[in-house]
Image (tube, helix red, strand yellow):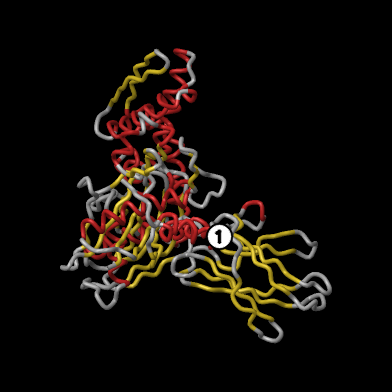
Amino acid sequence: MIIGIDLGTTFSAVAYVDKDGIPAIIPNREGERTSPSVILFEQSVPVVGSRAKDEALNDPLNVVQFVKRQIGNTSYSFLNEAGETYSPEELSAIILKRLKQDAEDHLGFPIHHAVITVPAYFDDVQRKATKDAGKIAGLNVVKILNEPTAAALAYGISQQSEDQDVMVFDLGGGTFDVTIMSISNQEIIIKATGGDRNLGGFDFDNKIIEYVHNQFLQTHQIDLYDDPIALQQLREMAEECKKSLSIYPESSFMLSSQGKTLRVALTRDMFVEMIRPLLNRTSIVMRNVLQDSGMEWADLEKILLVGGSTRIPAIREWIQEASGIVPSDELHPDEVVALGAAIQADLLNEKQSRMMLRPAVVDVNSHSLGIISLDPQHREQNSIILPRNTPIPAKKSDVFITMDDRQDNVSIVVTEGEDEDPNYVRVIGQSTIQLDRPPKGYEIRVTLSYDADGIVHINAQDERTGKDMGEFMIDRKSNLSEPAIVDKTKRFTDLTIN
């Protein structure tokens, strides 16, 4: 069996397709349908889920949260009080292994394969890091699936309706995506996608935290950032305050630090004013994706809400004001992505699939793919080869020439981004092609491709002779090396997770 996993910033979920062909959430060992993506190191033994989240107040130095925000970031590591250091891939693997174990306990047999979802706006580095985390956790990740596409699969299977053009507005705990797609019983075609990998409920909480921090500093001359326990308490209270303001017009709480106490009262209007800059960022993304799709608001039948942060009333009001469309809340914002991942997993298992409908999925790349080249003045420029929103899997090539006589190698630097200036794009990695010291102007055809998971590959050939130089390994500086992945996988094989 292949399970579907929604590896979330604040909550994660796992699902499967049952014997009747119905996608279903797998509850964790506590009976909960979602698990907080929080890890507590208790005497070096990782604890994942609600107990870890509850202990964050008592033991903040041994608790790590919001790991998804750091995936693919080589400069980040978490050091617990036992002196153990964990990379984002290892931390993600701990969460994934706990989800795997919960699925095995519930289903009664071992699980080896999974579809794992990621934000549509994740780049190659983050996708590769997610796949590596799955491998470290003991899973064969058969597919990396975009979260809005997963939601669309769950929606399309449940509706079995006429063709619809819909926007998926996916605002979770740490990331934000907007995707426009055409959905029918036969296929789901992604037309355009965009997003902000650093926008989510975490940032809404931070606005409350900033406000309270300033109030505490002005009232008591105490900097809460110097008190990790008070700061963790404030983060928990800020999250609860945000949720309360989604229901009630006003919320209040008490916060203490160094013997001083402050009562904080917030109204919904105050909160909306705090988050207005964040709301503006969602508007920019929506407009850009709509423009990229070649559509107008009037062309959309629905706007589907995905992710827990869409429960904030201001988000729904903001969407309606911008689009003139009342956003739909027929999907379960916390579960639909995992359910869609389970559907995709079942569809991949062609011989044993229980799904009556088998829609084809045509996804797109969320970032343009290119390489660094030199202009006639020998200045570096980013040459885009595969534009964003190209249906994937996809490949495209361009011809480049050597600039000097008797070059013995060419360095191909692969980029993701939309700008011609190399300073404003992300370097994925590089590969070196050895040459037989040809004369200046030697032509090399470079082919870049995205596979179905949105991961990049590179090929080259001698343009004059047509000789294939083969696929070149990309030295990804921001990802783990293969030996490191193998070593970490072995280390995690017998890891106990509570």
Q: Secondary structure at mark 1?
A: loop
Relative to residue 232, is residue 245 drawn left or right? left
Quadrant housing residue 413 = bottom right
Relative to residue 109, is residue 195 drawn left or right? right
Residue neighbourhood size for the residue with mark 1, other residues' Cα within 10 Å, grouped as few (<14), some (14–19), many (≥20): few
Give amino acid for label 1: Ser
Q: Residue furthest right?
A: 405
Q: Nearer the viewer, residue 312 or 347?
A: 347
Q: Is residue 193 visible?
A: no
- Residue denoted by label 1: 481
Give the residue at x 29% y 61%: 340
Reply above or below: 242 against 103.
above
Give the residue at x 36% y 29%: 57
Residue 93, position as x, y percentages in the image: 41, 53
Residue 183, position as x, y percentages in the image: 31, 66
Quadrant housing residue 133 = bottom left
Reply above or below: 45 against 222.
below
Q: Is residue 393 visible?
A: yes
Reply above or below: 213 against 84.
above
Give the residue at x 42% y 15%: 258
Relative to residue 364, is residue 186 drawn left or right? left
Look at the image and tell me in which quarter the C terminus lies.
top left
Look at the image and tell me in which quarter the N terminus lies.
bottom left
